[in-house]
Amino acid sequence: MIPIKFKRRKKVQKSINDDDNENGESSSSDSNQNPSDNGADDDQSPLHNDESSNATQSDETAVRGVLNKEIRVNDNFIKIMDVFKQYKEEDDNEEDDTDELAEANIMDLTPTSPFVKFIPFEIYKEFLESSKQYDLLIPKETQKFLKDFFSKGFKTHQEWSDALDRINVDDYSEEITKLAIKIIILTLDNFLQAFSLVHMNPLINIETLEQPFLNDYIHPCIKAALWHCAGVCYTCGEIPSINHVKRQKGDGVGFTGGLDNYQIVYAEGTRPYKVKANKEIENHCKIAKNLKNLFKEIVKKRVNSRKAIIPEIEVFGLSSFKLNLHMYVLGYSADTYYIKEVDNVTIPRDFEEMGGFRYFFEAILKWAVNPNKRLF
């Protein structure tokens, strides 16, 4: 694969890892200090809510201190972290191109990132083995149901509608299989209607616009999966949020229920065709940086409300680019944020490609059940 190239920004933003305190001491000296023990009164929040530069820098150090104390690091990740430090040093010496996410102290572990091509094969292979945990989230019964149902080979809307009506949920014992059936019943009909239009099918028509494409086909699947699998409330549109970088608008956002309402999902999408150059890279960087911001805001809220930090906490990103879906998680380990891909899948476009829905729904389920594992 050709490495992705990033343009060097005129002004390189300091990463959290490089922040110094006002006395010129390295922030790493504070990395294992709990901000709640910094001598402040019990009634005073250890993390600030204002947007001054001093408060922001103090918050960054406090967040790092909490995370470095609470989050465990495995041996493979330590090896990758050592490579990342070397990679950032070499990237800083590049005159023309640089890795934008590395500058933001985000280690990009997605398959096509420039950093992955820098990791020795054996180390990355070990990382991929550990990432198979996501495949284990889908029981064999669910996999078999998806394979059998979408292998029927029907060519009409009516045949598939009748097949949906014949599904008996009581025939299955796994909860995820029952959830898969519910999500398919709620969302598949939108695709069947499009396929029945033949030459006017909007998934093939090159004039399909971004919002109708996302709103009619992508967002309903994500909304149903997040709600039924994880109890996450997902909404779509041009959504601004105080949790986003510079209050950017996201195409989709997801919040946990209850009183806390943590934002743990951020999504970006494009139209299926006629996409401008570098749009995929721009969306990927935007998603990663906003996920990092969501992550920090959750930690700050939990510290301020004197709640425990959940080990191995992660937040969840989605990219819809052309007819491909990429599902990500972002977390923190060894003084560095990381983003990795849970799965990616191509969206089926007509009745000939119905078999692809087996992988489409399986990928969404893998990603959607993840928030259910994080007890926010």
Image: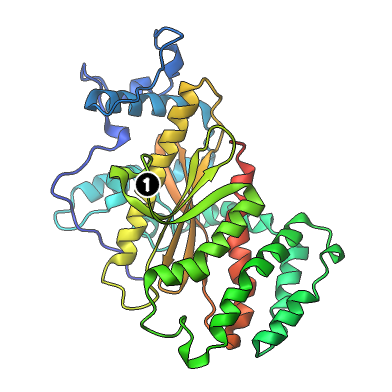
What residue sits right under mark 1 in the picture? 290
Question: Can you say whether 178 is above or below 63 in the image?
Answer: below
Q: Farthest residue toward the right?
A: 171
Which residue appears at 50% of the width and 22% of the height? 305
Q: Position of residue 152 (x, y in %)?
A: 72, 84
Q: Using the rendered view, name the quadrant where residue 15 is placed.
A: top left
Determine if residue 76 is in view: no
- Give the colour scheme shown: rainbow
Nearest the eye: 16 or 350: 350
Q: Position of residue 260 (x, y in %)?
A: 53, 33
Which part of the image, by quadrant, shows the N terminus?
bottom left
Q: Residues within 10 Å of mark 1 (few under 14, many from 20)?
A: many
Q: Using the rendered view, name the quadrant where residue 57 is placed.
A: top left
Q: Position of residue 162 (x, y in %)?
A: 75, 81
Which part of the image, by quadrant, shows the C terminus?
top right
Left or right relative to 224: residue 58: left
Left or right relative to 319: residue 128: right
Q: Using the rendered view, name the quadrant where residue 361 is placed.
A: bottom right
Which residue appears at 45% of the width and 67% of the height? 214
Nearest the eye: 252 or 116: 252
Question: Can you say whether 10 is above or below 145 in the image?
Answer: above
Q: Secondary structure at mark 1?
A: helix
Which residue appears at 46% of the width and 34% of the height? 298
Nearest the eye: 97 or 318: 318
Q: Position of residue 201 (x, y in %)?
A: 49, 86
What residue type is disc 1 on? Asn
Which residue appears at 42% of the width and 7% of the height? 41
